[in-house]
Amino acid sequence: MTAQNQTARTLRLPDWLRIALVGRNLKFTLTRIVVLVATCFVVFNFILLPVRIEGGSMLPTYKERSVNFVNRLAYLRHGPQHGDVVGLRLAGPHVMYMKRVIGLPGETVAFVNGHVLIDDKVLDEPYEKYNCDWNLPPVKLGADEYYVVGDNRTMPPQYHEHGVASRDRILGKLLL
Amino acid sequence: MKIIFRLVMLTALVALGVWLWTVLFPNPEKVIHKRLVALAGTVSFSSNQSNLARLAGVQNLGDFFSADVEVDIDVPGRVQERLMSRQEIVQAAVGARSAVRGLKVKFSDINITVAPDKQSAVADLTVEARVSGQQDLIVQEMKFTLQKTDGKWLVTRIATVRTLSILHFEPPRFPSIVLI
């Protein structure tokens, strides 16, 4: 036995540790890692965008600093619906607003004493827990426009980012 | 074997040439991107920065703008500011540095469109700003217009972009009755 072989034997890891680190078959383990990394890259860059929530405009539904995902495939077959929480892009997808859709294309949206009126009918909003006293004149939405607003409407409307968003700004629906 | 070696060498030489070309003659998008990132860094300042460093930062800020730069910032409920020259920007920066302890500005999603003559460009981006001591992150979509002057890209106009617009709809009224 040469000195080199002896060194190799002494450096060899115990079987249980080798299996724990690289698996029974190194080739399969490497393949699995490559597939997992590729899948994660595609899923988290193009399908489920991970987001960290900053600010309290969606309180109490979504707390600050919580983590969520924007599902970009949610609106492939149909458009956003009343009550959907969506991610809206600004200049790009790295920073987005998270808002609730309350008005759909063609509808007229108004706020009267804190209640949302869609085409003069009160919109049922079970998610709205805080008191709101907003009074805003009606807004008629165009063919490709949605009215979005946060759930926390305790502040005066001018301090709350809300309004009309075009369809191309809506990146997807919140997953959780 | 010799042919393979020569092919590898040729490929490496071509790659080196392309890399050198991009370093020596970078495309305008890259130059503008770098300049905007540098601008965000210059606007930012921290609470533990010395007065001298702050002053230097303010003086450097002027280098990014043309003399007749126009800044129109309208963030409802937060800021409404209209500045009409480089001098006014520098003064506003001095004011900001004395009003708040620190400011961290970052530009995200920078989309640059260069005009066909490569002498002007428009950059649409998201500004992320955090004021020291305040919890809220300020985000605002903005449009920067740049002009190439003496080989340098200078900002000539900054304007806020309304991500969510509100156009109030006036319901149709009955025609007014004229009493004769």
Image: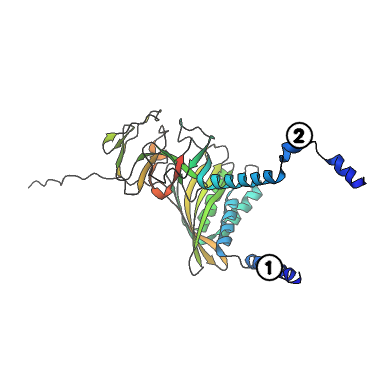
- Above or below B77: residue B8: below
Q: Is mark 2 on a helix, strand or loop?
A: helix
**Residue under pointer 1:** B11
Say which quadrant the N terminus of chain B sits in: bottom right
Q: Is residue B9 left or right of residue B43?
A: right
Measuring from the top left, give residue B168's x and y in whole percent. Answer: 31, 45
Specify whether disc 2 shares its chain with disc 1: no
Q: Is residue A68 left or right of residue A22?
A: left
What residue is shown at x 41% (from left), y 44% (from top)? A75
The residues bearing labels 2 and 1 have C-alpha atoms spaced at a distance of: 46 Å
What residue is shown at x 65% (from left), y 50% (from top)? B53
Q: Quadrant of residue B170 in the image?
A: top left
Measuring from the top left, give residue B62's x and y in whole percent. Answer: 56, 57
Q: Quadrant of residue B13 in the image?
A: bottom right
Mark 1 chain: B
Mark 1: amino acid: Thr
Q: Which mark is residue A16?
A: 2
Mark 2 surroundings: few (<14), some (14-19) or many (≥20) residues within 10 A: few
Residue toward you, A92 or A77: A77
Mark 2 chain: A
- Above or below A25: residue B142: below
Mark 1 surroundings: few (<14), some (14-19) or many (≥20) residues within 10 A: few
Q: Can residue B161 be seen in this view?
A: yes
